[in-house]
Image (tube, grey):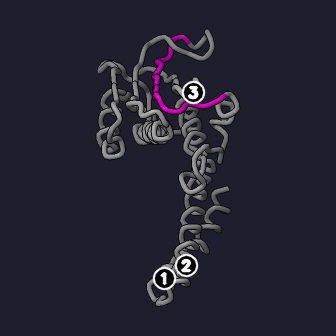
Amino acid sequence: SSGLIHEIKNPLNWSKGSLIIALKESSNSSQSDLLEDSLKGIEKIEEIVKGLNWFAKAQPLALKPTCLRELLDRTLELAKSQCLGITIENSVDDEFEVMASETHLAQVIINLLSNSIKAIEKTSDNRQGQIQISACVGGGISAEDDKLMKLSWHDNGVGMDKAQLEKLFDPFYTTSDVNDGIGLGMSITKQIIEKHQGQIEALSDNYNWAQVNIYLNMS
């Protein structure tokens, strides 16, 4: 619950503050290394608590008509420094409007972008990194959902095998290094899409590409 998370955050903040002070005052290199490792551990716990805080919040999102192309352009512009050497093709039409919370849908875009960048960085054949973003009307995981708008996010990174695909949206599941993420990005993404009364699915060809399809209500 949010109350339990609050109880964890307080001693966590005290511990972090004490470590920062001790690190500044330390003149012993070995001691400083231990303090830095401890501080990194505290920061990792902070990331986990932040993720858990999202799951503890059950309130509905405030949805409003949102131009998907404009939101994509703004979010990708802010993150362009992370995309050096990667070609991003955004072919989403200006006329597509969905019912969305812009802040939360922007978080979904950032999570997808982060995953794509990591997948492209893991390739070993010097391929040109590419991300393709497209949208169409008339999508849905099941036949009765054919009036939703389908947003497709495709990259040519290392992809995922069947076992990885099945766990993709599980909390704390990650294929990244232990020091590079805690495995909450895609589980939070799924939660956000579900709070939009939408759907999400992932497809992949291992070692070649991965694609996430998101289905949202049009305004």
Q: Secondary structure at mark 2?
A: helix
Q: Which quarter of the picture shows residue 7?
A: bottom right
Q: Position of residue 183 (x, y in %)?
A: 60, 47
Q: Name which residue lies at 51% across and 81% down.
A: 32
Viewer-nearest residue: 91 or 1: 91
Direction from residue 174 to residue 19 in the image, left or right: left
**Distance of label 1 from label 3 (alpha carbons):** 44 Å
Front tag of 1 and 3: 1
Q: Position of residue 129 (x, y in %)?
A: 40, 32
**Distance of label 3 from label 2 (alpha carbons):** 42 Å
Q: Secondary structure at mark 3?
A: strand
Residue 200 circle label: 3
Residue pointed to by mark 1: 23
Direction from residue 85 to residue 114 in the image, left or right: right
Q: Position of residue 128 (x, y in %)?
A: 38, 31
Q: Earlier in the sequence, mark 1 or mark 3?
A: 1
Q: Earlier in the sequence, mark 2 or mark 1?
A: 1
Answer whether labels 2 and 1 touch (C-beta < 8 Å).
Answer: yes
* Three-letter amino acid code at the position of disc 1: Leu
The residues colored magenta run 146-161
Q: Name which residue lies at 66% across and 34% down.
A: 164
Instruction: Report crowding for label 1: few under 14, some 14 to 19, many 20 or more residues within 10 A (C-alpha).
Output: some
Residue pointed to by mark 2: 35
- Tell me if residue 112 can be seen: yes
* Three-letter amino acid code at the position of disc 2: Leu
Q: Secondary structure at mark 1?
A: helix
